[in-house]
Image (tube, helix red, strand yellow):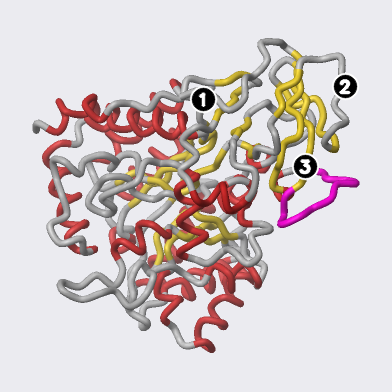
Amino acid sequence: MIPFVKLPEAPHFALTKATVPAVCIAEIPNLDVREGLVSVDITVRDGRISDILPAGHAPKDMPHADMRDGMIWPTFCDMHTHIDKGHIWERRRNPDGTFMGALENVMADRQANWSADDVAARMEFSLKTAYAHGTALLRTHLDSLPPQHEISFEVFDDIREKWANKIELQAVALFATDQIFEPFFDDLLAILRKHNGLLGGVTQPGPDLVPQLDRLFSAATENDLNIDLHVDETGDPSVLTLKDIAEAKLRLGFEGAVTVGHCCSLAVQDEETAKRTIDLVARAEISVVSLPMCNMYLQGREAGRTPRWRGVTLLKELAAAGVKTAVASDNTRDPFYAYGDLDPVEVIREAVRILQLDHPLDDAARVMTRSPADILGRPERGLIKKGGPGDLVLFSARRWSEFLSRPQADRIVMRNGMGIDRSLPDYRELDPLMEK
């Protein structure tokens, strides 16, 4: 494929006449914003952004690459993934595409196959893919039932160190919160302290949920851990543990960061119930990430019946209430989601369609750049900023319609001011693992 623009081979150069989502620029003084987009020149010196100027104002005494109105974005932040599960589809499929089918088949595959070597190989494959697509910050949930918690966090620690100069990684322990009073939980806390992890979990409604949440928040406080939970991944309107989580955070005065993912049942609540919960979430300063592709795959699935809803949470209403919101990839080629490639462009494109993040599209770019970077405590990762790293993704697409209509397979990913090799790993690399 012939690149649409050739990057100058020089330590100091300019990307001229570029179109950039305004929400992704730290400061945009004196720039004309149209459809949330601005026209700029970006100069790069020694791997860092040296200036952001109105289009046509880059110094003439340096090499130029004319973007011809092509878009430039910051590198992406994929804040909810499962790279420990990724790419097991060919050896353990979901026979009916249901949530229970996913749970049962992941559990069977984990018990049969998830050695350190197996998990490491699939994590490596996932990160090669994410890196080639332009991701620079990624959070993964790791299945943490014993003995898997010991295996996966050790593997993750090695992977995080190996990939430190390419993708910044964070890990969350994933387990059912009804196991929080079992002896293994203390071991899990020690592992999270050792590996700088986050406390996660899957909440389920029931009479024991409140004491479970009290234990969860207390443990997080005592061990100085942030929290990232799987919440209400169901279309049952009677399920709303999100409310209990918000109330617990407020009641206990928890000062750490709390993120919740999915929150699907919120979308099938009556308006009054949903509004009360959204107000609580906003007061508690809880962040919400929607996983549109996976949730549309799983939710509302019944044999022989067309789904009646999209499976996603009330992202617009949450954002309007002041809640920090984002979207992410979630699962990739495993029983919870048969497809996906950890490609943020695909996630954004599908999120715009599924969640109707258009009309206007002015701040749609934030959902996998600025917003998730802020939620993950790395706000500089989601911005194009003077003095920041030359970590950029360049597109031939000039406007939203062009960007959202094609996969943008010809994109150029720049890291530290240089283009990277965007070759994707071949699925055949995984064949030895699938033969199990």
Q: Which residue type does callout 3 highlight?
A: Ser
The verdict on residue 29 being magenta is yes
* Sequence-wise first label, 1 or 3: 3
Front in this rendered view, residue 239 or 398: 398
Residue tagged by mark 1? 166
Gap in Å between the C-alphas at discs 3 and 2?
A: 16 Å
Which label was assigned to residue 39? 3
Magenta region? 26-37
Q: Which residue type does callout 1 highlight?
A: Lys
What is the x, y in percent for residue 369?
60, 45
Characterize the magenta stretch by its predominant secondary structure: loop
The verdict on residue 237 being magenta is no
Residue tagged by mark 2? 59
| SS of the residue under disc 2 | loop
Asked if residue 367 is positioned above or below residue 127 in the image, the reply reads: below
- The residue depicted at 29 percent of the width and 28 percent of the height is 120
What is the x, y in percent for residue 435?
9, 31
- The residue depicted at 29 percent of the width and 41 percent of the height is 86
Circles 3 and 2: CB distance less than 8 Å? no
Gap in Å between the C-alphas at discs 1 and 2?
A: 30 Å
Q: Nearer the viewer, mark 1 or mark 3?
A: 3
The reply to whether residue 181 is visible in this rendering is no
Q: Is residue 139 left or right of residue 52?
A: left
* Sequence-wise first label, 1 or 2: 2
